[in-house]
Amino acid sequence: MTRKHTKTTCPYCGVGCGIEVIDQDGAITVRGDKSHPANYGRLCSKGASLHETLDLDGRLLEPRLHGEPVDWGEALDFVADGFRRIVDEYGPDAVAFYVSGQLLTEDYYVANKLMKGFIGSANIDTNSRLCMSSSVAGHKRAFGSDTVPCSYEDLELADLIVLTGSNTAWCHPVLFQRIRQAKKDNPDLYIVVIDPRRTDTCDIADLHLAIRPGSDAVLFNGLLRFLSVQKCVDQKFISAHTSGLDEALQAASSSTPDVESVARECGLSLVDLQQFYARFAQTEKSITVYSQGINQSSSGTDKVNAIINCHLFTGRIGKPGMGPFSFTGQPNAMGGREVGGLSNQLAVHLDIENSEHQQLAQTFWQSPRIARQSGLKAVDMFNVVERGQIKAIWIMSTNPVVSMPDADQVKRALEKCELVVVSDCMTSTDTTECADVLLPALAWGEKDGTVTNSERRISRQRQFLFAPGKAKPDWWAVQEVARRLGFVDAFNFASSLEIFREYARMTGYENRGQRDLDISLFEDLGQEAYDGLQPVQWPVNRAFPGGKQRMFHDGQFYTVDRRAKFIPIIPRSPVNHVGEAFPLVLNTGRIRDQWHTMTRSEKAPRLNEHTPEPFVMLHPADAIRFGLGKNGLARISSSWGQAVMRVRVDANQGEGSVFMPMHWSGQFASQARIGAVVNPAVDPVSGQPELKHTPVKVEAYQPLWFGFVLSRRKLDIKDVAYWVRARGKDYYRYELAGEQLQQDWSVWAREILCTADDGINWVEFADNRAKRYRAVRMEDGKLESVLFIGPDAQLPDRDWLASLFQFGELNSAQRAVLLTGRPPQGVQDTGRKICACFGVGKIQIVSAIKAGAVTVEQLGKQLQAGTNCGSCVPELKQLIKTQLDQSNIQTV
């Protein structure tokens, strides 16, 4: 028996958790790395289930040209010849790369070097444009550099944490657990959550400000003015280290003349607003955490700077427990920013439109040409593709036909484009379906390189699996094309280490302390040291050989005069407004257990159990207003597109707005690509789209029948009006609805399940007049599939039926009640899964509460729920509260 341990980094969100992979004779499990300073052993439900996502089901394992398998040489020749011909005929700006925060830093570096230094265009942008480019722009305006000043440790040192535009509990669960623990350890820690919705993050909040969507800049301008009136100011810091205060204060005063006007514009109670402002003024150790709710806006950069202004005014930056702190969305969004993955960057924090920086980069790379102006940002890039001005695009490790706003436009653009190259680890995505060339990339566990998390911490992703089939590293594929384009000497890397060393050398090249990013201590790193590289926060150079925990402690910034700049902010409303035609505001975001477009996370059955179906969440008043029944279906429409999703009614959703998750693609649902609905308006500074504010209408979608199928086999059910697929343990779940009734449901059922009788045991029930049909298919005494059809959404719960797939032969009691969809008398259904880590269902939890387990700790002892990643703790608390309110049980 052999047992191998590999320390690596999680490939999901920007927290950058350390993971220990245990390979015992080929059986792989994962656990949190207790030595990693990002998570200290904690993992969320997604990270804890990574070992369940490593199969080769659906993997792209060989290059494909026009859908046919080819060898690497033929595919790369085709790509290089196409790019060369187009550049020769139309110029460098006729080609583009669209890359991803899923790439490793080494992949990013090679792609950026080729595009900007050798092809000579800046038309390389990244899906990170969609999540943190407003933060980048805000940092640049205030600090002169894209510098995150804080460290995760500051969350534990603060006395006030403001979480704004961040559902931390679901989007950065491990950091949420650190904050929860910090609150337990420090009774004086006060937490404010600013969010139009009452999310699970509010579970730890002392104050929730349910702000009107889009009014964030008003709120923080009001805070700046309040701090000025109250004379809560660090005058010494401002005089020595900042500029532009008078203009910023004038803008704040003109836009927010008093606290009362702020309360009105933000839709807040005056008492709550004053409480927040007073708490911020009184608490020196204040940290403001912000994420996509701030960034994803047509005025996102202004919102970022409105926050930063408040920290500069109070001198709360660069010191323990204080500062503005951007939580990035992707595992290597920061690494992409470092090497220049955005179209308005050059590389290693060099400015693309600075002639000295252009010369520096060109000299370092010894390149024949250099990009001299910003390239096209993501939304503009795909618009230009559709107009035919970009004739070749290479998409790496991302799925823009799902994730981009106005996603149908992106699809049209790719279908018109002369040459579309897609590098991916999966064969079938909405984007790969538009490709001329598919290049098989490595997935997590097969890759080797580095990533950088939200606190500037560089960590290693280490390979512990062999490359499957003909899959190759992304950097290798880019390098091979570069060599075919004639750039052999500059693209001669033999390993990710060699790329990392060149990148490190470039950060220190002609730097002399002028740029924040400097990891030049690694420029001569050996293989053994690279293999053993420990997580470290940059800069890492002669001045800071062990890294640097927080930036700006000395008051020195990276502007021309080395002073931080206050930015005057005039709040702007979202670009498109609600009105009679589109009366609601759509907000998009993540759910707890899924990631991006689900190509990885859907493979783990436990991650599909909590939320197996896409939904639109509305306030009860809006549901009544628009005639939407609970658990029914709704059509959501905007000026750009539409989607159909399950209705979820929740008083925690703000009235006048709706929430829909971003994850479902055409691979998993028929009409749930929410990107097709989303407003493509962008921030004029950052180019970040308005993903949190799309005017929509929501109306009941009323098919003639509803249904579901549970099957051991993956089925091809795509000839119905509405379908959603979710992978369970030993089964697949399909939610269905149709606009045509079947003449013979029995015949239709056999077609759906792709089977003839052939001795198979079928049990059926049909009532055509009532539009009801139920069927059970057994094989060798085991449940093979079930199908339920009805005239409305009131069908049996799926959970007990789903649990039967784990058995061998069913017993007589189980078989006797299959067509009822309910467990036999005396057998309890577990209910919808609440705890993904241990598979604990709602009915189990409620029963335990009724039996006396009335604290989260007691539930944990009895059921294990909430004892691992903690992501379900807010829901456990809500269930406890609901049951106590209903039964008047008193907690001990």
Image (cartoon, helix red, strand yellow):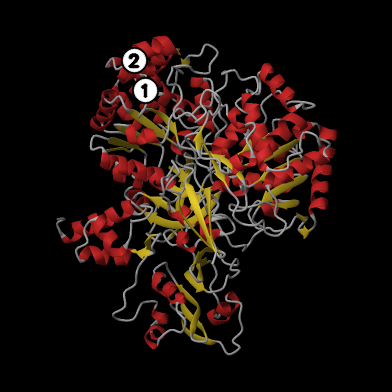
For the residues bearing labels 2 and 1, Cβ distance under 8 angstroms: yes
Q: Nearer the viewer, residue 407 or 486?
A: 486
Q: Where residue 553 appears, x then y in whole percent?
A: 42, 21
Q: Which residue lies most toward the bottom here?
A: 759
Determine if residue 801 is in view: yes
User: Residue drawn 40% across and 9% down?
Assistant: 239
Label 2 secondary element: loop
The quarter in which the C terminus is drawn is bottom left
In this figure, which residue is indicated by the disc labeled 2? 234
First in sequence: mark 2 vs mark 1: 2
Report whether residue 657 is seen.
no
**Which amino acid type is shown beneath numbered disc 1?**
Arg
Residue at point 47%, 25% (across, down): 302
Residue at image point 42% right, 68% down: 792
Q: Quadrant of the N terminus?
A: bottom right
* Residue 302 falls left or right of residue 849: right
Residue 376, quarter of the rendered image: top right
Instruction: Indicate which disc residue 478 carries.
Output: none
Where residue 762 appears, x then y in whole percent? 51, 86
Residue 560 percent across, percent down from the top left: 55, 13
